Image (tube, rainbow, N blue to C red):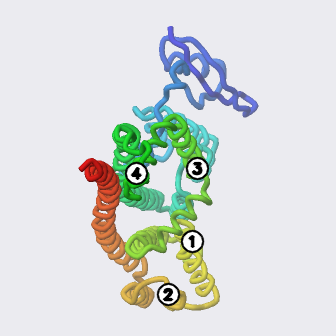
Amino acid sequence: MQEYDYEIADREGQIVTGQMQAESEKDVVRMLTQSGQTVIQVRAHETNTHSVFRRKLKNQEIVIALHELATLLESGVSLAAAIDAQARGSYHPVLMEAFDTMSRDLMRGESLLFALRDSALPLPEYLFNLIEAGEISGQLPNSLREAVAQMEYDQRVAGDFKNALTYPAILVATGIAAVLMIFIFVVPKFSNLLDGRNDLPWLAEVVLSTGVWFNNNTWFLLGGLVVFGAVAAQLFKQAEFRQRMLDGLARLPVIGAWLSEADTAKWAAVMAAMLSSRVELMDSLALASKGIRIRRRRLRMEASANDVRSGSSLAEALEKQNALSATGYNLIRVGEQSGQLAAMLRSLARLYDENSTRRMKQALTILEPLAVLLIGAVLGVIMIGIILAITSVNDVGL
């Protein structure tokens, strides 16, 4: 015998949930229907013994599940059957619970848009708009496919950004650790050179004194690093702090161009997806602008949307706000004149994506040597200070 959770609608239309022991799900359904109940859902009862150790749901798992859902819908499977199939798949428990919730909502007559919002999955806002447009136009599979493609693009951009900064971050962290180790364990070995001497070179005295201080305050220093790490972690949890950091990086010569072009590529891709799913132009502009990370560029795009609302064409509005390049204005202008704006925006997204990738490589070409030079310079200053101290003692002895 196994315990099953069930959800039924009684004779008065009220939703009732409960548990029952039976040999199989079919037995549960049979016993419930014999008593005149309308069965909504039956599933094996799951214990939460290991919920504390539950693995965090990854965005990639959400994308894969939605990709499979889009494939089922494109194959002609009904929405209810597709959602039910996903609920029974071998997914992360959070995803299975979300699809269970969606299945119940659909059986109650709710729309997929309502079911997705009710599932509490961490989904981007443009997905909901695309789903709504798909349900209105009758092109739900195509709209869902557009949303999945955009989520995959967002994931790839975020992954490229993370991968690009991983090596420089490791390099800098390793360099800082090496400097601290030298100051704590190596430099203090020469601290006796400071005893009663006033004729040491200033660089040697600074290096040796710093090493002595580090050695005497090791635990204080480590505690300070822990506090600094905790404060930094808390700050990075705040959206405003992350926004200011990003805005600051966007002002740097090469990195700023890279981030700006990546933002523009995402804006153009979201616009293309929205327009392909027959979302209104003003709604598309409002939603695409929200996805721009750099505040300065987001304000320009919002100002462009206001100009479009006032009667300007999209190309004119963007050119007025200096939001794109000359090539971008031409592509959008051609798209507006030919009625192929979505296709032109896709081309624009690919163009800016390629430019962003090139800028990223340029940024890495600069960041990595700078990190190596900085670490090497610090280590070199320390070693020069030690050598000066040793040679000055030898000179005095001669």
- Residue 349, by quadrant, is bottom left
What residue did someone put label 4 on? 207
User: Where 210 sits versus 358, above or below?
Assistant: above
Task: Say what amino acid the circle numbered 3 marks.
Answer: Lys
Task: Say what amino acid the circle numbered 1 marks.
Answer: Arg
In this view, the residue farthest toward the front is 398
Label 4 to label 2: alpha-carbon separation:
51 Å
**Nearer the camera: disc 4 or disc 1:** 4
What residue did someone put label 3 on? 237
For numbered disc 3, what is the local secondary structure?
loop
Q: Nearer the viewer, residue 341 or 377?
A: 377
User: Where 302 sits versus 321, above or below?
Assistant: above
First of labels 4, 3 by sequence position: 4
What residue did someone put label 2 on? 322
What residue did someone put label 1 on? 295
- Can residue 76 be seen from the camera position used here? no
Task: Say what amino acid the circle numbered 2 marks.
Answer: Asn
Task: Say what amino acid the circle numbered 4 marks.
Answer: Val
Left or right of 59? Residue 37 is: right
First of labels 4, 2 by sequence position: 4
Instruction: Look at the numbered discs 3 and 2 and tell me whether their residues touch, using CB distance below 8 Å.
Output: no
Left or right of 115? Residue 10 is: right
Q: Nearer the viewer, residue 281 or 162?
A: 162
Q: Residues within 10 Å of mark 3 (few under 14, many from 20)?
A: few
Q: Position of residue 263 (x, y in %)?
A: 45, 70
For numbered disc 2, what is the local secondary structure?
loop
Q: Position of residue 15 (x, y in %)?
A: 70, 31
- Residue shown at 39% from the left, 41% from the top: 191
